[in-house]
Amino acid sequence: MGKKINLTIDGKKIQAMEGDKILWAALENDIYIPHLCAMKEQQQSPFAGCRLCFIEIEGKPRPVAACTEPALEGMVVNTRSESIDRLVEAGFNLIMSNHHIDCKICAASGACELQKIAKERKIRLKPKKLVQLDRNLPKDHSKDCIIYDPNKCVLCGRCVTACRTEGTAVLGLAYRGFERMVTTFGDIPLGETDCSGCGSCANVCPAGALIETDN
Amino acid sequence: MKLTNEEKTAAIETSQRILSNYNQEKGSLIPTLQQIQNELGYVPSPAMEVVADHFNVMKVDVYSIVTFYNQFRLTPPGKNQVKVCMGTACHMRGGNIIMDSWKRRLEIDCGETSEDREFSLDRVACVGCCTQAPVTVINEEIHAKVTPTRVEGLLYAYQLDKDKENKKAGEDN
């Protein structure tokens, strides 16, 4: 640890700390790789669930996720290619197909990771070929300082990690398949849990599902 | 659904008794939950809290496991267990319509138990008599070629049986 190594990403020679994952090495050198679930503090045990940070490494036959691949000396990495773009677009479309899109009135608009990815990779926010699946789950207004809208959740799990490191560990992922959602023990509203209202979940939410209010 | 106080104490006592046979090895978490379900017929929230304490995990993580696996149920089974087949053949013959009519008539969702604990509603994958589709199983008894009208009829029959029993019980006293 602490040793500097050299690698090349998209033809740009950069330095990174040994043991850092490629995603963080790239982001720190202003090379954008789409990502939703990655958290720098958790980089040694990444969630690796959003499947958007695909990259190509010279010498490896298949694309790999940048958040799980450690940077090594002399590595040559590509963040864009036809196959990578297709993978990312397919993954992004699947995520957006059940994300409730209301950017015009969404509090996260502007700071939204989904909008950023769409802009960077020139992907439509609303997938053309997939049916929009809205689950119509009720919003949770029970906590004064946090609004939770499960219909906007992309299941990245960042709020769950944040709640465990900074909050009172009330959030968790439950159910399976299409029903999977971020929820509390027994699906009770946030206001009835031990939630301290620290807002760390809203700070890390990339999609505007958890929003901190002024109250 | 609200649990009665007796159910809560039963849940806590049962899970504590079962847990006394296990150490804190996390691999025993699911077997414990299975045993609780075997004894109580479901995994109630107080039991999940006791289990979470014992294995030193977050209670929301135990909830996550219980909701992930289909084998666990969260509500107590009703006196009459209604299982609607949603297998391929039953699905093609309108199994979802039958499920909807049960939901409407019992005023509960799939996987829930009615407030009076008389009926619980579940979906099953296939009961092995696809020629009779769509099938509903009530307490191990198979009802073939169910229609929404038949759902009404079945419920009426149960109501009549219950009335008869009540009357008999009244006469005996």
Image (cartoon, rainbow, N blue to C red):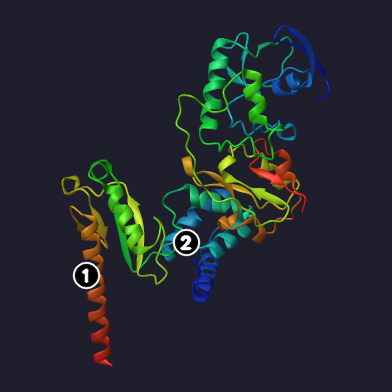
Residue B12 vs residue A104: left or right?
A: left
- Name the chain under label 1: B
- Give the residue at the far left of this rendering: B131
Q: Residue at x 47, y 59 (%)?
A: B74
Q: Earlier in the sequence, mark 2 or mark 1?
A: 2
Q: Nearer the viewer, residue A165 or B86?
A: B86
Q: Residue at x 56, y 65 (%)?
A: B46
Judging by the rendered image, the residue that carries numbered circle 2 is B36
Q: Quadrant of the C terminus of chain A?
A: bottom right
Q: Secondary structure at mark 1?
A: helix
Residues at marks 2 and 1, CA–CA distance in whole angstroms: 33 Å
Judging by the rendered image, the residue that carries numbered circle 1 is B157
Q: Residue at x 39, y 64 (%)?
A: B77
Q: Is residue A86 visible?
A: yes
Q: Nearer the viewer, residue B88 or B46?
A: B88
Residue A2 vs residue B73: left or right?
A: right
Residue A88, percent from left and from top:
57, 21
